[in-house]
Structures are given as structure tokens and as C-alpha cells.
């Protein structure tokens, strides 16, 4: 409200997003508001036949510097910040008019920097200064001023003004404004930190600005609330950017597992399939065709694959889709593209969730996330994403026997899979497919035994297979387990105080062993 009922109410409208602007201004006119506006917003309103007062007429100063300076003036900010019953004399002395409603949305910084051809200079020009200043001033004074940053709120504002019951809405919209400007500044800080900081630098201040994108029915358990949050436009080819084509709503666990599966399948340039259960790969394979990759991945552990998440790094074809729904219960299927005939086949299983991520590059080691962020009580753990591959190190053969070319190929594959298995991780592989996976055990030798047991349960022989370990072997017991099951070659980081004992065990059994000098813990 204005300081006096005899003073005409005024609304300042200055928006980048013109959706609903004309209708909002027309409604304000019907409520006897004087409309103040700037630049493009003023032109749009005049073209619609709405009487508009230019901000330059209010300030007595023209817009200058290509519009960089237009609203940063006491006549504007005084009108926003003035308190009824407190600042009336100041307003009269300096002939400042009260402003009662503000509609501002900001230069499209986020959309601008999302364009592949965006230059740094263009990004900087899309950093709004006057807009956030007006929003914050109006939101600070929300006891008197109604401030709206989202066109979706225009109708609610008009209804509240018409009824005269707008205080609760003013409170709500003020909170929304401060969240909006905080997120806007966070996007700018994030972008500029990428431009000016080294790739692996961790920021002194980790800016927030996370926006709720999708509410979830519940979290890991029904008594926990949950939602998906993001900042900026999601990166194409990710779970955050995926389109759900069918199926029940995604759950917290579905999303976590689907992300784990997609990250793993992206690590392979060849035609690959990854099946995940409880965030661990239970079957991984690469093959000449998609159906062959799926068949091999499923055969690793059909029991765990039941109700699992399946990811592909090629468009999902109809043959593979039909085989999946005829063979197993599947919670989520993820692929860059779901071909039309595959969609028709999957439609027979309406509860199966099907995600189309859009195309992505399969570049081993590359991840779309700059940081890996995890919560702890009253804080966050932050680290660079693990993008390390064997191309970044110089693996060394440390045994008397050198791996054959086929073993080296399988060792590379097994090492890649191990990176996505919860530590302690052991992965058995032959012919570029997993045979058994031991994950998340407190003892590495127990993981080695579990992986071998799983292979035996499915009738898969480990004779001539290779074994990967995500971290060093503290004792020779895992080597003895591998040899007893027919393993012929091992890849591991090395670095144990008992490396010599472990190498001697491998030599004793006639195994080849490669040390990578890089570990892949995944907690």
C-alpha cells in the first residue's frame, strides 16, 4: 500500500521474460495502478495500448551505457524501500513517489551460458545488476511492497490486490525473491569459477543455488522426504536431463541406481550394457551387438538382475527391448535414444520405467560433474570427480609372466568396471564380460570369495579369467583365492607394504599381475 490512500498506487514492471506481462499490466490498470517501465518492457506495453511512464521520467536521468544504468537511482530505490509512517517526510522532501508493486525478472544468464557458442564477454553482459537490486529492495520492504519474480504468480498477485488480503502472499513472494537472486548469483559464480579457476581447483566457497526440480514420493525409505535438486540447465545425456517415456514415477533409489548405471556404461566406447542393483554393477559386457551385450551382462548374475536397472550406450533397439521384458522384471531402462519399435515393445510392461537421456559421448574417464558432493551431518564432503583411467598412468607388469594381449584387453575392461563397484571391489572378467562381482565388503578377500561364488552359482567358469581389485591387496589371501578358481591375470593399484609377498604369490601360481599405481575407491 502507498503511504496515503489519496496517493495513486504505482507498479514498476521491468522483465526479460515477457510471458503474461501485458495481461498483468492490464489488470493493474483496472485496479488504478500507474505503470512504470523500462526499455523493451515499456515498448511491449505501449504496443498493447497500455499507458506507461518511463523510468527516465521518474528519475530525471536517461538510460545510459546501453541500458547498463537505468534504475539505479534514489527515485526508484527510495520508492521501493520507503516505510509508511516512517519515511513520509523524506519522500515529500525529495519528491520521491511510492512504488507498491514490482515485477522484475532477470537477464537470462543461465540460458545464455548454456549455449555452446556463448562467449565470456556475452555472458558478462547478461549479468543483471539493476534487476537484483530492485528485487532485493522490494523484498526487504515486503511489509509494504508486493514483489513478483515469476510470471506464474501474476494471477495470484492480482487476486490478492483485488481482495485486499495480500500480506501473506507478500511474505511468501519475498522469500521466493531472495531464493531466486541467491540462485542467480550462484549460477554466475559457478560459471566464472569454471572460466577462471583451474580444472581441479576446489572452491574456497561452494555456492549453492540448488533448485527443486522434481519432488519424490519419499526417500530411501517411506518415512523420509525427498526431491531431486539441480542448478542450471541439466547436462544433456544425464539422468537429470532424461525424459521418462513410460512407467511409474521414479523413486529416490531408482534415480540413484539409474545414475550409477549410466555413469558406468558411459565409460565404454564400444557397444555396452550395464545392469545395476543397489548402486553396484551386477553385470557388465561389451559386444558387437546390443543384444549380445545384454545377454552377457544378464548371465553374470540373473538373480541380482531381477528388478534391476539396465543401461545402454547405444539407442535401444526392438530386439533387445523384447528380450528384456520377456526375460526379467526390470525397474528402469536407460538409453540415449529409445527407438520407436522398442517403445512399442516396452509399452507392454507399463510399470517399467523407461528413460531417454538424449545422445551422449562415450569418453572413458570423462564425467559431466565438476565435483562429487556428498552430505555429512552439518556439512558436505567435496572432491573432484574420479575421471582417472589407465591412459593417465603407466601400468607396470610386476610378475615373471606377462599378460597376453587378450588378458590385457580383459584387464583393462575389468579395471574400468571396478571403478564403479563399491569398495572393497573385486571383478572377474573374461572375453570383455563380467563373470562375478564382489562388492562393498569389509574384507577384500571376502569380496574375492563372493565374486567367485556368484560365478559358480551361475555355472560360469573362471578358468582363464582375469581379476581386478580397486585397491591394493593387504595380504596374499585374495591371490590364492583367485588362483584356486582358475584366474590367470590380475590388475590392482599396488602400494601395500606387502606388495612383494603378493607378487611372490602371483609368481608362485604362475599368474600375471599388472599394477596401475592408481586406485578407485568408491564409498
Image (cartoon, grey):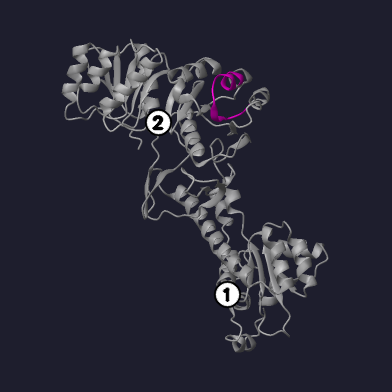
The circle drawn on residue 270 is none
Which residue occupies the foreground of this view, 424 or 383?
424
Q: Give the quadrant of the N terminus.
A: bottom right
- Residue on which the image places disc 1: 141
Which quadrant of the view contains residue 145?
Answer: bottom right
| Whether residue 251 is situated above or below residue 162 in the rendered picture | above
Q: Name which of mark 2 and mark 1 comes first in the sequence.
A: 1
For label 2, the crowd category at 10 Å Cα-Cα, with few meaning under 14, some 14 to 19 and many 20 or more, is many
- Residue most extreme to the front: 223
Residue 190, horizontal then vertical, whole percent: 48, 51
Membership of 76 in magenta stretch: no
Which residue occupies the foreground of this view, 446 or 427?
446
The circle drawn on residue 420 is 2
Write the residue at 67% across / 61% down: 153
Write the residue at 71% across / 84% down: 5
Q: Give the quadrant of the C terminus.
A: top left
Write the residue at 55% across / 43% down: 234
Which residue occupies the foreground of this view, 379 or 448?
448
For label 1, the crowd category at 10 Å Cα-Cα, with few meaning under 14, some 14 to 19 and many 20 or more, is many
Amino acid at each position: 500500500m502507498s503511504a496515503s490512500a489519496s496517493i495513486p498506487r504505482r507498479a514498476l514492471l521491468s522483465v526479460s521474460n515477457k510471458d503474461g506481462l501485458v495481461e498483468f499490466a492490464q489488470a493493474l490498470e483496472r485496479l488504478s495502478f500507474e505503470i512504470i517501465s523500462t526499455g523493451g518492457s515499456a515498448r511491449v506495453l505501449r504496443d498493447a495500448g497500455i499507458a506507461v511512464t518511463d523510468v527516465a521520467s521518474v528519475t530525471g536521468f536517461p538510460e545510459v551505457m546501453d541500458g547498463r544504468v537505468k534504475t539505479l537511482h534514489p527515485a526508484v530505490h527510495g520508492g521501493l524501500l520507503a516505510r509508511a509512517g516512517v519515511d513520509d517526510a523524506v519522500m515529500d522532501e525529495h519528491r520521491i513517489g511510492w512504488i507498491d508493486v514490482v515485477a522484475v525478472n532477470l537477464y537470462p544468464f543461465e540460458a545464455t551460458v548454456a549455449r555452446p557458442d556463448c562467449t565470456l564477454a556475452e555472458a558478462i553482459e547478461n549479468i543483471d545488476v539493476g534487476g537484483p537490486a530492485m528485487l532485493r529492495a522490494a523484498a526487504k520492504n515486503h511489509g509494504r511492497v508486493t514483489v513478483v519474480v515469476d510470471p506464474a504468480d501474476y494471477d495470484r498477485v492480482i487476486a490478492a490486490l483485488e481482495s485486499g488480503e495480500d500480506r501473506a502472499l507478500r511474505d511468501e513472494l519475498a522469500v521466493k525473491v531472495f531464493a531466486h537472486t541467491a540462485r542467480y548469483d550462484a549460477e554466475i559464480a559457478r560459471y566464472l569459477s569454471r572460466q577462471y579457476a583451474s580444472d581441479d581447483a576446489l572452491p574456497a566457497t561452494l555456492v549453492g543455488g540448488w533448485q527443486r526440480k522434481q519432488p519424490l514420493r519419499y526417500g530411501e525409505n517411506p518415512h523420509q522426504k525427498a526431491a531431486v535438486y539441480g542448478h542450471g540447465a541439466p547436462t544433456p545425456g544425464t539422468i537429470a536431463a532424461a525424459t521418462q517415456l513410460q512407467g511409474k514415477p521414479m523413486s529416490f533409489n531408482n534415480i540413484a541406481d539409474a545414475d550409477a548405471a549410466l555413469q558406468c556404461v558411459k565409460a565404454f566406447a564400444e557397444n555396452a550394457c550395464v545392469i545395476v542393483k543397489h548402486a553396484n554393477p551386477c553385470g557388465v559386457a561389451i559386444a558387437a551387438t546390443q543384444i549380445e551385450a545384454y545377454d552377457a551382462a544378464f548371465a553374470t548374475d540373473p538373480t541380482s538382475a531381477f528388478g534391476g536397472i539396465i543401461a545402454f550406450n547405444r539407442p535401444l533397439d526392438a530386439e533387445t527391448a523384447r528380450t528384456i521384458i520377456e526375460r526379467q522384471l526390470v525397474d528402469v531402462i536407460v538409453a540415449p535414444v529409445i527407438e520407436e519399435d522398442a517403445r512399442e515393445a516396452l509399452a507392454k510392461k507399463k510399470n517399467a520405467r523407461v528413460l531417454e537421456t538424449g545422445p551422449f559421448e562415450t569418453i572413458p574417464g570423462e564425467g559431466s560433474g565438476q565435483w562429487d558432493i556428498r552430505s555429512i551431518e552439518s556439512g558436505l564432503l567435496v572432491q573432484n570427480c574420479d575421471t582417472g583411467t589407465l591412459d593417465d598412468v603407466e601400468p607396470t607388469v610386476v610378475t615373471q609372466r606377462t599378460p597376453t594381449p587378450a588378458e590385457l584387453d580383459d584387464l583393462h575392461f575389468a579395471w574400468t568396471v571396478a571403478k564403479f563397484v563399491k569398495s572393497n571391489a573385486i571383478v572377474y572378467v573374461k572375453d570383455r564380460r563380467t563373470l562375478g562381482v564382489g562388492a562393498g565388503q569389509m574384507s577384500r578377500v571376502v569380496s574375492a570369495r563372493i565374486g567367485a561364488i556368484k560365478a559358480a552359482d551361475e555355472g560360469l567358469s573362471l578358468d582363464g579369467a582375469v581379476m581386478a581389485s580397486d585397491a591394493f591387496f593387504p595380504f596374499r589371501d585374495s591371490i590364492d583365492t583367485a588362483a584356486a578358481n582358475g584366474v590367470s591375470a590380475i590388475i590392482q593399484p599396488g602400494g601395500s607394504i606387502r606388495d612383494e609377498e603378493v607378487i611372490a604369490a602371483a609368481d608362485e601360481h604362475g599368474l600375471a599381475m599388472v599394477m596401475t599405481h592408481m586406485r578407485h575407491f568408491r564409498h
